[in-house]
Image (cartoon, helix red, strand yellow):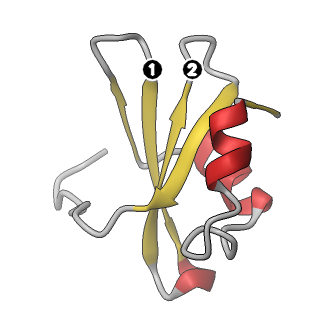
Amino acid sequence: MRFTQYFLHTSQRPDRRGIKLEWIERVVAAPMRQVVQTDGRIRRWGRVPEAGGKYLRVVLLEDGETVHNAFFDRHFREMKNES
């Protein structure tokens, strides 16, 4: 995986230090939801049971490989009929 300088900087914040790279990799590989933003960045969400069932949002650059941001999304709600 590749990372932006922004990700490397923000991942050092106290509220993000506990996010493991393996969780990010898992969400990137098998997201439960994906949205492409108007600027081409890709948002992917996944549930992390090891983090108390929180939902992790990972933002990728347009290439679909470079991680730009990752954080627990307190506002994410799983849709019941999602496939």
Amino acid carrying label 1: it is: Arg
| Placement of 21 over or under 7, stated as above or below | below
Q: Residue furthest bottom?
A: 52
> For residue 41, which quarter of the picture?
top left
> For residue 33, which quarter of the picture?
top left
**Quarter of the image with the N terminus in it:** top right
| Placement of 10 over or under 40, stated as above or below | below
Amino acid carrying label 2: it is: Leu
Which of the pair 69/58 is nearer the observer?
A: 69
Secondary structure, mark 2, is loop
- How packed mark 1 is, by other alpha carbons closer than 10 Å (few <14, some 14-19, many 20 or more), is some
* Residue 11 x/y as whole percent: 67, 57
Residue 42 horizontal side relative to residue 35, left or right: right
Residue 30 horizontal side relative to residue 26, left or right: left
* Residue 66 x/y as whole percent: 69, 26
Residue at left offset 57%, top offset 82%: 51
Q: Which residue is mark 1?
A: 41
Residue at left offset 21%, top offset 63%: 77
* Residue 80 x/y as whole percent: 17, 61
Which of the pair 32/16 is nearer the observer?
A: 16
* Residue 57 x/y as whole percent: 45, 51
Q: Which residue is mark 2?
A: 61
Whole-number angstrom distance, CA of label 1 to CA of label 2:
5 Å
- How packed mark 2 is, by other alpha carbons closer than 10 Å (few <14, some 14-19, many 20 or more), is some
Residue 75 horizontal side relative to residue 44, left or right: left
Secondary structure, mark 1, is loop
| Placement of 77 over or under 70, stated as above or below | below
Residue at left offset 45%, top offset 40%: 44
